[in-house]
Amino acid sequence: MLHPNYFNNWHVDVAGTGFTVLDRVYADGDLTDEALGGSCGNVLLSLAMLQRNVAPVLALGDDREGARLVNEFSQAGALVRYIYRRSDVRSPVLAQELDTASGSHSFSFVCPETNEEFPRYHPIGERELTLAAPVLANCSVFYVDRLSEIILKAMKRASSAGAIIFFEPSDIQENHLFTKALSLCSIMKYSEERLGKRLEGLHTNCVRIVTYGAAGLEVCDASDTVWCKAFDAPSVLDTCGSGDMVSVGIIDWILTNQFERTRLKASDLLRGVVAGQRLAAENCAYAGARGLFKRRGADHALKVLRGE
């Protein structure tokens, strides 16, 4: 049993919860790979490979797919004690269909081989929230890309403990949850194509990072807006994971510079944004959301982030 004072001196760089799935990659119709995927999964695993202290807070099934996901996190060096395996849940699976000629991809929760529905993402529950209390009270950054009432509670606990809340919504399904999340987040990153119209005229105190695909992105706060043009990719095999790599660069920069939540401005993040854009451009040359990490290794990814 851990001593009661253990957590007073214990800290993680990044904790997070949200969309984490087993990606099945079909390149030109053929199953070529299985790997951990989903924005939350990609960001946390990549940061763990960069030797950051990472703690995923997830609910997965007690099944083969769940074991595969936990093993990938563990192999990367992440703390997996807050990944809960439940017999009443099936681990989520997602098919990525890749056209290698164009570099385009699409996603489906339907198996292209059997036409059967894959299991969907399941958010953490009250039990997982209670058990994760130590990590929520001891993280520098808390990453979220999906919302639920319980996840909102997790955001509140991490925020109250001083964590920077990095919120990356892909959709807005429940306005009341989104409004509450917006009041808690320090950074919100979203796609103009997906959410731009719905968030037009948004007034918020957080730093906003708005992505415009291959064109680039803008970084905004209450008094400043800066445009960051995208880097040209050396070659394009697969654009999957590009946005996640930008998030990795930003969070890695935040951790390196030990920014405080209350003083965070758009200008603080610009070099991290650029580092993430470099990583995203390089990643396009490889298949899979973390193709660069898999093919060239974390040391090479770190050099790309550092501009070496």
Image: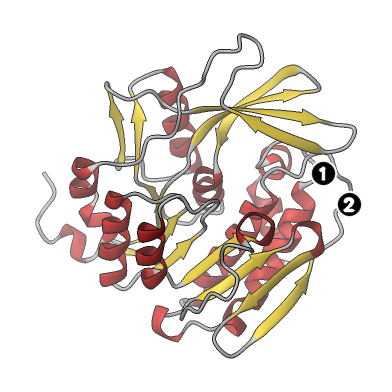
Quarter assignment of residue 127: top left
Is 195 placed left or right of 303 in the picture? left
> Does 100 appear above or below 62?
below
Is residue 105 at least partly visible in the picture?
A: yes
Is 243 placed left or right of 231 in the picture? left
Q: Residue at 42% of width from left, 26% of height from top?
A: 91
Q: Tell which of 276 and 48 is nearer to you.
A: 276
Q: Position of residue 125 (x, y in %)?
A: 25, 41
Is 209 placed left or right of 218 in the picture? left
Q: Residue at 46% of width from left, 28% of height from top?
A: 92
Looking at the image, tell me whether mark 1 or mark 2 is earlier in sequence order.
2
Q: Position of residue 195 (x, y in %)?
A: 60, 59
| Quadrant the C terminus occupies | bottom right
Q: Residue at 63% of width from left, 88% of height from top?
A: 224
Is residue 308 at least partly visible in the picture?
A: no
Asked if disc 1 and disc 2 are in contact, CB closer than 8 Å, the reply is yes
| Quadrant the N terminus occupies | top left
Mark 2 neighbour class, 10 Å CA radius: few under 14, some 14 to 19, many 20 or more? few
At label 2, the amino acid type is Pro
> Does 185 appear above or below 169?
below
Read off the residue under disc 1: 285
Q: How many marks?
A: 2
Read off the residue under disc 2: 234
Q: Position of residue 299 (x, y in %)?
A: 66, 52
